[in-house]
Amino acid sequence: MNSVTKIVTYPIVETFHSVQGEGYWTGVNAFFIRLGGCDVHCPWCDTKHSWNSQNHPQQSTQELAIAAKVVNPAIVVITGGEPLMHDLAPLTAALKNEGMQVHLETSGAHPFSGDFDWVTFSPKTFKAPHNNIYSRTNELKVVISNEDDLKWAEQQAALVPEKTLCYLQPEWKSPQSKELIFNYILHHPRWRISLQTHKLLQVQ
């Protein structure tokens, strides 16, 4: 089978139609594609079931593009897991062929691939980001649980383009992080707060 007709598949944890719950695009009609596989292993991760890609069924680019098109979303969000563990070029090509606006949510821990309209970069201290992610970042979103995370956030912000939107997001099991972020933003105007509004709304 040649490269033109080859069917490309990905391990899919889930697909769902909802609203974007975080960051700049909060509240926007979105179709989510959650890919299996992650080697970053954040201890507070709320999707640990996604880490082992072998636990999830494969779906083709064609199937995923059709599923997204049917619900007519404003954006399609590719997330994980850590989606950049996979070559995302075939998937983004299939989605864009259907006229979709495609967004990425990534820790940047692997080399960049794919064609995206928006890149949300959420770097983690547990696995260093790949250098080629920084110049592609539209939105920097750093999860905060303690003051050391704020130092990490500033280090990462120094590496992204000046026009990048910068968000601090409370770690969902750490109530004290909300106050820490609130006070920090009052003294550091480059930063904004990102809340997981889908959890407040109790939707997926």
Image: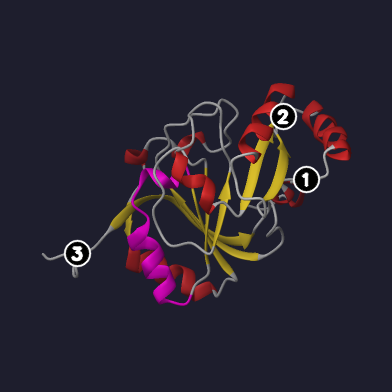
Res. 67 image quadrant: bottom left
- The local secondary structure at tag 1 comes to loop
User: In this rendering, does residue 82 appear at all?
Assistant: no
Provide the residue designation for mark 2. Answer: 150
What residue is drawn where x is 19% and y is 70%? Answer: 4
Q: Amino acid at mark 3?
A: Lys
Q: Nearer the viewer, residue 79 or 72?
A: 79
| Chain part drawn in magenta | 80-99
Q: Amino acid at mark 2?
A: Leu
Identified by mark 1, the residue type is: Arg
User: As drawn, which residue projects farthest toward the left?
Assistant: 1
Residue 6 is labelled as 3
**Which mark, by number, is residue 56?**
none
User: Could you tell which of marks 3 and 1 lies nearer the N-terminus?
Assistant: 3
Q: Which residue is mark 1?
A: 190
**Which is more foreground, mark 1 or mark 2?**
1
